Image (cartoon, coloured by chain):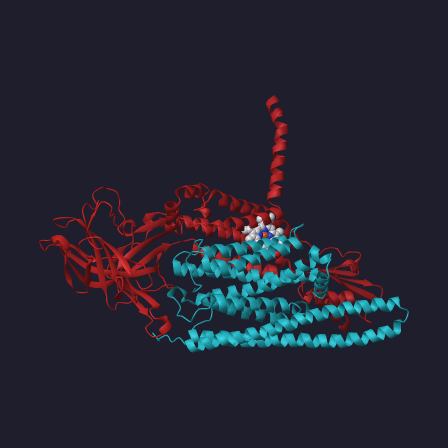
Chain colours: A cyan, B red
Amino acid sequence: MNPLVLNEELSQLSLLVTYAAMAVFTLAFLVSGYHLSQAASSKSRILENQQAATRSGNVAVLEKESDIATQDSSKSLIVLERVSLALAILGTLILAAGVIMRGIAAARVPWANLYEYSITGALILMMIYLVSVRSKEVRIMATFVVGFVLLVLGTAVSVFYVQVASLMPALQSYWLVIHVMVALLATGFFSLAAALSLAYLLKTANWVENAKTKGTENFRAILGIFPSKETLERLAYRFNISGFILWSFTLIAGAIWAERAWHRYWGWDTKEVWTFIIWALYAGYLHANATRGWTGKRAVWLGLIGFAAVVFNFTIVNMFFKGLHVYSGL
Amino acid sequence: MSSSQLYESPDIGLTGWARWIWRQLTSMRTALLLLLLLAAASVPGSIYPQRSADPNGVALYFREDQQLAEVLDFFQLFDVYNSIWFSAIYILLFTSLVGCVLPRTKVHYEALKAEPVQTPTNLSRMPVYQMEQAPQGIDPIVEGKKILETQRYRVIQRGDSVSAEKGYIRETANLIYHFSLVGVLIAVGIGGGLSFSGQRVLAEGETFVNNLAGFDSLSPGTFFDPERLAPISVTLDKFEVDYDFLNETNIGAPLDFRATVTVRTPTDQAGQTSLVRVNEPLDSRGASVYLTGHGYAPEITIRDANGDISYSGATIFLPQDGNLTSIGIIKVPDNLPEQIGVVAFFYPSAIELASGAYTSIFPGVIDPLISMNVYTGDLGLDSGIPLNVYALDTDRLNQVAGRGTNNPAVEIRLGETVDLPEGLGTVTFDGIKRFASLDIAYNPGQLWVLIFAMLSLAGIIVSLTTPRRRIWIKKVGASFEVAGLSRRDDPRLEEVVRELTESIKKEK
Ligand code: HEM
């Protein structure tokens, strides 16, 4: 057997690099948030100008002025969006370096404890986002996605962090590579769908639709530049479909692995239970999308409940529930 | 005559009711609610310990709060997945599924034989619609039909319009998906009934024979027939562990467990030697052998006051922590002049704490030590009640060595022989072996579960990624219209209609 060599210094460096990625993501978050607010105010300015132009008789002059103003602001909006996208890409590259270093330091795939699941999962989510970013409707979700990734990474480095350690024999299996990778992929798709669903719910919420205070009015203006609620719902559905297929595979792969490791393919261990619950919830969500009276808001809520179960499974079940799966490393 | 008349009207009422209930049960809304209910009903099983997975956890509940535990038990919260209420939910769900999918199969079968639907009169009402000038010398209907046929649509021309449809496989795959779920359930049920799994702890050198008496514990399925146990024997030749000595932060972490076993069959007395590791069970016909645990089995000999051997052999010590501080129980009924019971602690790498107690600081054998609390009295072996070999009931025994007595615990290092107190005899620490916990399991259903699960996965992938599309082309004077409609979400519908229109125009 080759001797195992763990590289603790490299793993410290990986942690530093992960912090650096978080710094860049924070910038990306701020810029994309600023972009949203600018886009919202420019949109309402255009509307105001148009109204003013129609009211005053002097349409031609005003229109010209507002055209110039619109062009200027739309140019700066494009720049802002590009900058935030560039920052997101840069952050993702740095995070990728951090994750790879962690893997090299541990001499194995970097997904074998809660800290590693989190950083690899964050990386995968960013990659899925960046691949989908060509669609304008998905691109606008930057603030949500990067914000969520920051939350995940922040929890990872502050709560989940553990030193590099060897793989316990129970985890030494190529099923670790397949099963966990696919689970993280599924979680990435579910997360994006959840971001879109959240935008949908905010957009259709009563307190937003009938905004009373200045603050909520601004908020509504920002939501106004998000895709229409039909588009949000449809996109969320598409991401959830990918997530559901991958999650089904996760469940099957987990059962095959359990048979190899524990002599039975299914034993209602806590982690198995929650994998099943998530699967059933999303199956319910897909049904809701085909059931009269359940499409729209109800289905979106169901999708979010499914996602809440994913988050619960990832955090609370991993850390506090008793069972055979004790891999958080905490 | 009159009685049949009497029965007639309530009879109609009953079938009416039955039909109504059946319609409710097989509605999409019910399926949805039952799925959510199934998810919710699974939750308590992850909160309360389950008898099947964690019997000790259940016992603990009963010990800590008997009353609460009895209430929980009444609601079957320790057996959630076999409970009446959980079973009721999934049986209803699958009844609903069959009741839903069978009629859909019939409808779909008919749709497969039927021609594409009539072209609607008003195509501009369709979700995707385009109208274009037809180029000179081109019949958009003929061209369009040709293109759609190469794209594997089912096409029919009716007058000056074409109606095309594709993606029937979406529904086919969806039906396969749902039927496969039934297949999974049936395979799980039948396989579970025919299955068995047994546990056996073996010290190095020991042999286990695959029959009912050979197991320490056995969980057979309902239809399991002991006659069908494969006639094999398994010898644990060697058990090896690699620990990390190299990486400072990781010292003592186990890197690999290897059990070398020899499997013999009636026709192969020499046997086949192979390696069993975690994740790499030994698959032999009719049963697989899995490695599920390990620990130390120190070899101990006890001699009575006359010097005659009253106990000897490798004794299983159950690990208590990551550095393998282990506890073993020794019962010596034939010792003279008195029966002896021992609660022994084994420290593979012992150090003494400030308190005078010992602990192990490394799971490998570096400086092994056994420390014994010794009891005398009636071990209760003759009472006829089956006793746990891993526990000693000290209540009725008299402690003669260890904390709280006049004699210190008997401490003994590898190779030493030490006197027992009060002239009971001597004890020798002869050597150290390891033991392995093996699971022997057989489930003829699991391959079928896998096959149906994969089939369902294939079904859901095809069903969710193939759109069911309808396309119409219609000639209106010198122009032509193209329209498209998809059942459910279809990201490419617009593109498809646009491309089709372009190709018709380009065709020459
Ligand atoms: C174990 C229970 C069930 C599971 C896990 C399940 C899962 C699913 C999933 C994941 C889909 C989405 C596939 C798609 O949209 O093409 C689906 C579709 C569907 N299911 Fe189920 N199902 C179950 C039971 C039922 C039952 C009981 C019914 C009938 C009442 C039913 C009727 C349907 C129908 C009609 C569709 C197609 C919806 C569409 O038009 O796309 N399913 N099912």
Tell me if B13 is positioned left or right of B292 in this view.
right
Q: Which residue is at 66% across, 70% downward? A: A33
The N terminus of chain A lies in which quarter of the figure? bottom left
A120 lies above or below B63: below
Question: In the figure, residue A327 lies in which quadrant?
Answer: bottom left
Q: Residue furthest left?
A: B306
Which x, y percent locates residue B379?
21, 46
Q: Residue at x 10, y 53 (%)?
A: B305
Residue B377 falls left or right of residue A202: left
Check the image and report above or below for B195 versus A310. above
Q: How many marks?
A: 0
The C terminus of chain A - image quarter = bottom left
* Residue B75 coordinates in the image, percent (x, y): 46, 42
- Residue A119, percent across and down? 51, 69
Q: Nearer the viewer, residue A26 or B348?
A: A26
Estimate the x, y position of residue A30 in percent, counting from the top left.
63, 72
Task: Evaluate whether residue A318 shows in this view.
Answer: yes
Residue farthest to the front? Answer: B354
- Residue B22 found in image quarter: top right
Residue at coordinates 77% horizontally, 71% vertically from top-left? Answer: B505
Residue B101 visible (yes or no): no
The residue at the far top in this view is B2
Q: Is A39 left or right of B212, judged from the image as shown?
A: right
**Relative depth, front residue between B90 and A281:** A281
